[in-house]
Structure formats: C-alpha cells, structure tokens
Amino acid sequence: MSALDLDEDHLQVPLDPFAVQHGLYWLLAALSRRQAAMLIVDDAHWADDSSLAWLASLRGRIEELSALVVVATRPSSLDGSGGALGALISDPGIPLLRVAPLGRASIAELTRDELGAEPEQAFTEACHRATDGNPLAVIELLRDMRREGGQPDAARAMRLGDRAPEAIERHVRGRLDRLGSEAVAVAQALAVLGDEAELQHVAELAGVELDHGAGLVEELIIAGIAARATELRFEHPLVHAAVRDSITEPRRGLLHARAAAVLADGGRDPESVAAHLLLALPAGEQRTVDSLRAAAAVALQRGSPDAAFAYLRRAVAEPPPSRMRSAVLGELGAVAWATGQTTAVEYLESARALTSDARERAHLDLMLAEMCFYGGDYDRSMAVLETALADLDGRDDSLELQLHAMRMTSLATVDSGWPAAADPQYEQLVARAGPEDELGRELQLTLAFVGAWRGRHDAAETIARIDRAFGESMVTVASAGSLMRIAQGVAALIHADQCDRAVELADGMLTHAAANGIAIKAGNAYFMKGMAELRSGSLANAEADLTAALDIAIERGAGFAEVMTRCVLAEVLTERGRLSEAAATLEGIPPETETRAVRYFRHAALARLHCAGGARAAAIAELEAIGQEAASNEFHNPRVLPWRSQLAQLLATEDPVQAVALADSELADARRLALPSAVGVALRARGACEQGSVREATLSESVAALERGPARLELTQALIDLGAHLRRSGRRRDAREPLRRALDLASRCSAEPLIMLAGDELRAADGRPRSPWLTGAAALTTSELRVARLAASGLSNRQIAEALFVTVKTVEMHLTHLYRKLGSSSRNDLPRLLETELEGDQARQPKTKTAKTQNPRPP
C-alpha cells in the first residue's frame, strides 16, 4: 500500500518505535552501499527524544556502514545536556569538535563577500564585539547592512549592536517562546539590568525565587540566549538588543523604575541607580528626585558634569516637590553653567524666581550674569548685576564684592565708557583684595586685568598682583565668577608681556577642565593660550588652540567668546598668509554682538587683513577707528593693541610728522608700563619714519628690546627691516646675519609670508637661505604633540577629541599635519617615532636665542 492509499484511519495507528528505527537504519545502510554517505543533524538541541534515541541506536552499528553522522548542537549544550543528547556528547568514542567563534580576519572576509567593500578596522572590531564571532549573527548583521546600503566604516561601527537584525529577532523570539513566560521575564530582567547583573537582582526584578531564577538562567544558557560565563550576560550584544527591543516602551519604563528600586535597596552606587531612573517614566516620586540628585553629586566629584546635567534634568521632569524645586533648578543651572550650555539662563532664572533667600539669589545671579555675558547678552548681564547688588543690600560682603568685580569687568570691556562712579568701586576692590583668602586673591586678578587692560599699572605691578594671587590651587577653582577672574589673570599676564607664564597657567586650567568636564573653563583656557601664543609668535599652536576655543564657543552658544575668538584667530590666519580664511572667519561676527572689546579686536584684525592684502586705505580707516575709541576711553596699553605703531608704519612715507607722533606716543606708554615687546614694536615704527644711520640705530634698538620679550613674530619683522635697510645701504655682508635669524624665526613661527620675505631679502643680500626646520618629531607643535601622544596611547580620534574638548575634525587635522612631519601615515608608528621626543620645551630649545628666558611647560 503506497502513501497515497493511506486514509484517516490508517494515520491513527501508532507506529512501532523499533520498526521506525530499524527502517531508518536500513535506509541509511542502503544509501551507504551505493556510495559513502553523510548524515548531518543540525540544531540537535531542538530534536525530539525519538530522533535522539535513533541517533543513539546508530552508535553500535555505524561501524558496519560507509557512512558519517555529524551532529551539531549549541556550545551551551556541550556542558550541561542530559538525556539522549547528553549521552551522545559524553560518549568518549565519539569525536567532539568545538568550533571557535569567527575571528576578526574571518569577519573581514565575510564583510568583503557580503558588501563588496573593504571594511575599516574599527568596523571589524565593532562587528566582532556585537556578535561575539557568532556566524549567524555576523551574516545577518551584514545582510541587514546590505539591504540598508550601509558602508563598513568607522561611522557605521559606532551604531553596530544598537538593534538586532530582523532574522536575529525572530530567532530569539522563537527560542524564548519555547521556554515559557517565567524564562521570558528573566531574560527581560537581564536585558533591563544589563550584562554582569547579579542573579539576585535579576530574580527579584523578574518576580521569581532565587533558586528558581538560577534554573531559568540555565535554560536560557542552553537555549543560546544567555552565555555560559562567570558573570550573567547574553550570548552576544545582538541577542541583548533583540530581547530589549521586544519589550514595549511603557513596560520597559516600568521595569527600569523597578530596577532602580531593586538596586537602591541592594546598596548599589547612586549612578547605577540613576542610569535606570533616566529611562523610567516620571511619576512625581521624591525618592527618585533624591536618588538623581545624589547621582549628580557623585558625577560632579568624578569630573562628569554632562552626566550630572542629565540626572538633574530628569529630576526636574519627575517633578520634585514644590519645596525642593528651587534647589533642584539651581543645581541644574549650576551644572549647565559649568558645561557652558545656554539653557543655564532658563534654569537659573526659574530657580531665582522660586527662592526667597537673598544670598541664594545672589549666588544664582553670579552664574546668570556670567552666562549672559558669555552668551553675548551684555545688557541683560549688567541688569542682573545691578538688580543683585540692590537686592543683596549689604547682607553679604563677599557676594557683594564678587558682584562688583564682575560689574567692573563689564564696564572695562563692554560699556561705551568708564564712568566716574566706577573709580570708587575700583578703589574698594583695591582695599579688599589681598592674599589672606581665596576671594581676596581672585579680586587681585580682576584688578590686574583692569589695570593692565587700561594701562593703569606697569608690568611689574601687574605681575606682582598676579604673584600674590596665583597659588597652586588657583587653576583648579571652578565656581561662579571665579572662572572669569582666573581668565582675567591669564589675560593680564599676556598684556604684561608674560606670554610663556600665561600659556603655563592656561595649560593648568585646561588640564583641570578636561579632567572635570568643565567646557566653559576649557573654552577660556584655549582662548587664553591661543592669545598668548599669537603674542609670542607660536602661530601653529595659536591656530590649533583658537580653533578649539571657537568650536566650544559655537557648540555652547557663547556669543562673546565666539566673536572674540574669531577676531584673534583671524589675526593668526592673516599672519600665516591665509587671507581668505581670515576674511571668512571675521564675516561670521554678527554686528549686534559687538562690545568695546570686540570692536577693538575686530578693527585690529581687519587692519592686519587689509594691510596684508594691500588695501592700505582700508587698513588706515580701521586703525583710526580704534584710535577714536581708545582716546575717549583712556585706553593706553600698547601690548593689548599696538594700533598707533601699526598706523605709523602705514603713514611713514605719506605723513611722517603724524607717524612720528603716533610712534612716540606709543613708545612713551610702552616705556611707562615697562613692556619690552611694546617698546620694540614702537621703535620699529619710529624707525620706519627715519633715514640713514638714525634709522639703523633705532631698528637695532628695536631688535634689542624685542629680544628681551617674548614677541618672536615682531622680532622677526624688526630683523627683516634692519637687514633690508643694511642691504639697501650697500652693506650686504652685514645684512645677512639679521636676515638669516629672521628666516629661522619666521620658520619656527610658521609665518609663511615672513618666510618668503626674509628669504627674498636674504637672496638679494647674496645670502643662501637654509631649509626651514619643518620636519621630524621636534617640528611638532605643542597641540600636535599632545594629539600624537594620546593617539600613541591607543585612544581613538573621538576619545582624543573628548579629552581635549575639540572636534573630531580638529583631531584629524592635527594627525594629518603630524603624519606629514613624521613621514608616516599610520598611528601604529607613533609610539616608536615619539619614543625619543624630549619632554617640555627641551625639543624646542633652539627655536630662538632668547629661549633661556622662557618657562618650560608640559605639552
């Protein structure tokens, strides 16, 4: 009777197991007599008992046949299976082959086959992590990418494992459905708690007893959901993603809330608890608010204000009880202030409106005024300070002094003039400032800045104030008002011709900012470093640091910081000969953001740009605009902006009388303030108005003055002027030495236009220019060396960017430049190439003949 003749009655007749096993054996025997046969049984862990029994029965008879039987099962089955499958696995006469996970080379090969593209190393690594080398997971992930049109690059690598391919999700759902609801609950609990969760927490969250939970975890291991490892975890991240995504959003939120409670009751650290509360649904629970505030405090202690911001923002959304709302909003505003986020204004104003305590409002107003200032809203900043002073009304001398100090900063740099009423306040600060306490020292910095900015103090007095103020711990201060005052201290050093010390202090600020995640401090530090490096002629370093400062300012919406940085960066780009980039940088300044300080620096940057581009009349107009404002505001420090000497240079031929008056006026201020670099710059301008031996003497005096200061760029210009004058006077031999020095300095400053000018003059003097010193490890700038060392330590570009508060694009720019200088294209070579690099400035000691006067600083 054929199978086609079977009717329903025949199908109800139970089959004889022995007959079935016997028939299947003879079927295999018949096949093997024709030719050698192979029987492959895949996924044996899902096989029924009858099929496994037949496989076991073959064990004693397989030797009679020309046949090979291959049984495949999950790795988890090899260590814990019982019954018929366990008997087969444990039989010592049956060879057992354990197939290792796919390695990185195999994954790369599969990627090439599936996607037809060469995978980047970062992608291969990420694919290996996401799949744990599971072949099915690798194949499905690659096929999913092929359907989406993705490329196996570093950008895609960052997203691998975020979600599981559809085929993996189906496999996982199918396995879980076979195990029952309790096993599903345990898998979901593990998905919510995450890998390496403790069994007791998983069982409690799943709602099962601990012993029963252990058995359910064993079932998940056998099913290939969980991994057989020392800690609880899924087989690979894609399985984790599949289980997680199978939970509905509302249920997931409830599970995270319960997970937070379980962990809190178990004594876990606040941030572990808060990680779940961030994903839980708001429910108005004070316990949640308390937990999130505790986690924020821990995050701040470990230097992660971004994490603290996330915790506190979630606490506000809970929301907190009305009696706590002001405090939580104030904490959130303070963290937003530290991270430089413009949303700080909204939080601080809300907190201020809810508190009735005048001192608390004053603390909030300090942050609010500073944030408004950095954001470019100067009128609002000043209004906040005025209101705060009236509101405080003598209740707290310390807070009142801090408010006055910030107000004085605004008066010095923003308002149209320095009102007479500011002088008594200035004298009050002078009387209060001193080394006795931290506030007194910080006030010294404000006074040093205002005095140096307006030319009230000579360099010695400015430096003395800063010496009294700056202790070892000063650069680590990070409170409202303090950051501005510390930045003022660094700026005062720059204005007092102490650029190397300014860079050293700014480096300390940057180190503290990076360690503690304080973006506003990092932005200040990068700007001050860039300014000091421009003034000392380190143009490549200045460009790198100012670019970083600009990135931070734009990202955080810091309007004042952005426009000031644009002005100074444009000067750097002009000095490097990149005029179109300088012009584009200045075009990004909206007119409404201009303050007195911005106008000064913008006019100065445009004057340099026009002069470099040959637009003499436009340059004169910009410098005359500075002169009009400087005259009305008693602005006398030529080291801040040497507009008179620059204008004198342009007028030297056309109007020598006015040019001499301008140069002499600046020279008098430079000598009164004891600023050697400013003296040298003014003397160079004076020399441009003179002839013959008088000119030679003045230019020689200019060179001598500049050699006593840090201004290598201006020294280069003076040496070129002196050499050119000697050459035109017929003294070519005498001209060569200053011109050779100028060419060497210009190369070390990375000032391309001056390199060309010095080289042309040297050739005209029958000299032979040496090749610029632009290659090798010693040619790396400070910023390039910093990036190179981080890259050599194994950090990725993104990790380097995060550590330095710069963009990935900036890191890539530095790497491109340093690879070219080192003659390499691989970061794998960096440890070897940097191995002999000296610390600090030792590798840069030959840069100038005045290097011995410069303070060493860490790269």
Image (cartoon, rainbow, N blue to C red):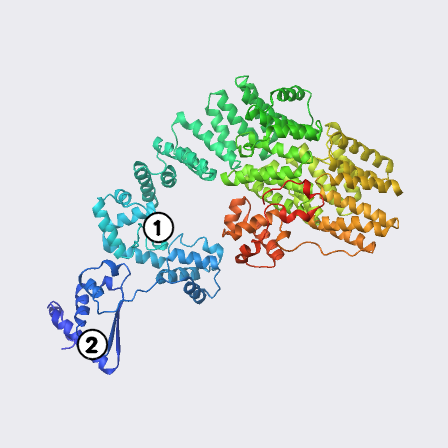
At 30% from the left and 54% from the top, the residue drawn is 227
- Up-down: is 460 above or below 149? above
At 25% from the left and 59% from the top, the residue drawn is 79
Q: Is residue 324 left or right of residue 556?
A: left
- Can the viewer see residue 236? yes
At 61% from the left and 59% from the top, the residue drawn is 823
- Can the viewer see residue 691? no
The residue type indicated by label 2 comes to: Glu
Q: Is residue 658 left or right of residue 164?
A: right
Front-lying residue, 332 or 10: 332
The residue type indicated by label 1 comes to: Asp
- Up-down: is 519 above or below 4? above
Quarter placement of the N terminus: bottom left
How far is mark 2 from mark 1, CA to CA? 49 Å
Front-lying residue, 122 or 553: 122
In the structure shown, which secondary structural element does the residue marked by tag 1 occupy?
helix
Q: Which mark is residue 267?
A: none
Q: Residues within 10 Å of mark 2 (few under 14, many from 20)?
A: few
The location of residue 99, given as percent across then percent down, is 32, 65
In the structure shown, which secondary structural element does the residue marked by tag 2 occupy?
helix
The location of residue 383, given as percent across then percent down, is 59, 25
Q: Quadrant of residue 205?
A: top left
Q: Is residue 772 left or right of residue 376?
A: right
Q: Are discs 2 and 1 less than 8 Å apart at CB?
A: no
Q: Residues within 10 Å of mark 1 (few under 14, many from 20)?
A: some
The location of residue 283, given as percent across then percent down, is 35, 34
| Count of numbered marks | 2
Q: Which residue is mark 1?
A: 245
The location of residue 100, given as percent across then percent down, is 34, 63
Q: Which residue is mark 2?
A: 63
